[in-house]
Amino acid sequence: MSNHSTVTFGATPLRIEDIVAFARTDVKANISDDDALRIKIDSAVAFLDELLEKEGVIYGVTTGYGDSVTVGIPLDLVKELPLHLTRFHGCGLGQYFSNAQSRAILATRLTSLTQGYSGVSWQLLHLLRDMINHDILPLIPQEGSVGASGDLTPLSYVAGALVGERDVYYQGEVMPSREAFEKVGLSPITLRPKEGLAIMNGTAVMTAVACLAYDRANYLHKLATRITALSSLALKGNSHHFDEILFSVKPHAGQQQVAAWIREDLNHHSHPRNAERLQDRYSIRCAPHVIGVLADSLPWLRQFIENELNSANDNPIIDGQGEHVLHGGHFYGGHIAMAMDSMKTAVANLADLADRQIASLVDTKYNNGLPSNLSDADDTRRYINHGFKAVQIGASSFTAEALKLTMPASVFSRSTECHNQDKVSMGTIAARDCMRVLELTEQVLACTLLAAVQGLRIRIKQGEVNEHGLSENIRTMYSDICGYFDNLTEDRPLEHTLRTTVDYIVQQRWDLYE
């Protein structure tokens, strides 16, 4: 549970916001000193030691991994086995996760291990905590996980860092983890027999990315709502499309909330607006129905993600108090895969919605009297000025790429590892796809946001909209954006302004609805 500056692991279930805090701030990690957690950790370690003394058979401890489960490990080699696991999985490729994502991954793995059913030592838990607090972040390649047995390859880079054999990012430099540890007075650990599996055989990477994706999606559904209100104003839309009686007869709670937010933004109750057209086009009139799908999905998406976050998801599970070694498949990331496949589809629909809104704003056939391509050039210069023409093309490009990525990853299971892992989740690929869809959608929303502000600016300049009659929320955001986005009277490159807007979206600059 977070108190804004510290998150305590092992006491109570964590929320998505706690993991996001590690990515967005310098929040510190603490491990609970609760007796119940101490007993779980200590009993699991003691039980494993006892089994090894009795030569008990434990998967991944006294046997090989995966299809090599039939290979018995001589007791004199048992202690070396986890180190070999970290080494042969060091084959990830692709871009590295960002520092923010790596912090979230470390925090997510620590959340699972402090459930007390993984058979890990306090020494390992404390070093994970210290890596977070000192910002010693493993370089983790994004590609190489099929999502079962969990995120083996990417998490091997966490395990390898703990033993001093992988690179980390520390104080602006890439260096071996052993060197970074020395700088802060820490030492690498020697992995106990179950600890390589405990770190690697879980869903921490996909779940961490899912937490960050949820935070961005939650913000984007609110931003898409605000952009719809701005677009409606710029297009002289009909505010009656968002009437509360209308939405009372189709009572999806998230959809109703989106409509209520738009009503508030449009001052519908005090200044209802009637358009020349009886019905606005779908991209305005049906916006609550589009955005509402994501809004209504967020509660169950949170449930899926937070259940996975607060689970023991490695194999085998060690019940030290009951003295059970339970071999199963909790490393399977099916719930995260489904959550991410579903989220990316709902988010891509926001991109598609915004792309249709900007298409209406720039087109004189549909924009109710706004100038072509939203250029505010004077009459003598309008022949050579093209305003938002290329920005709309860009928005269409970003949207097409986002829509292309909505193919569900979870149905593309591939049998791996000598058919031992013959049905896998693809949860990490789904999560990475979802994050890319979010990035592209943020770009589309940035384009449409600026276009809507430009359209509203022209309406105000022409005296068709009274700025002082706008709702406070709309007026505040409009004024802020106009502060860095000058009126587009003559063509100029808009890349810098677009990048700034995207950055503001990622940083969640604007307070949007409570």
Image: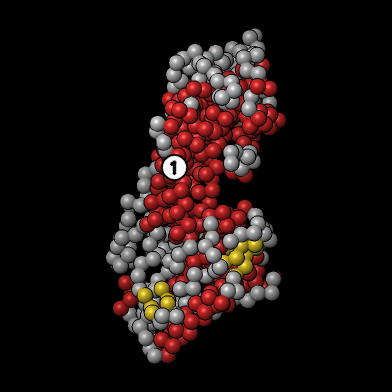
Q: Residue at x 63, y 40 (%)?
A: 511
Q: Quadrant of the C terminus?
A: top right
Q: Is residue 317 above or below residue 468?
A: below
Q: Is residue 117 above or below residue 45?
A: above
In this rendering, position of residue 257 left or right of residue 54? right
Nearest to the observer: residue 129 or residue 489: 129
Nearest to the observer: residue 25 or residue 99: 25
- Label 1, secondary structure: give it: helix
Q: Is residue 508 above or below residue 467?
A: below
- Look at mark 1 in the image and give the residue it sits on: 296
Q: Quadrant of the N terminus?
A: bottom right
Q: Callout 1 environment at 10 Å: few (<14), some (14 to 19), or many (20+)?
A: some
Provide residue 134's location: percent of width, then percent of height: 66, 65
Q: Amino acid at mark 1?
A: Asp
Q: Residue at x 56, y 68 (%)?
A: 11
Provide residue 126's location: percent of width, then percent of height: 60, 73
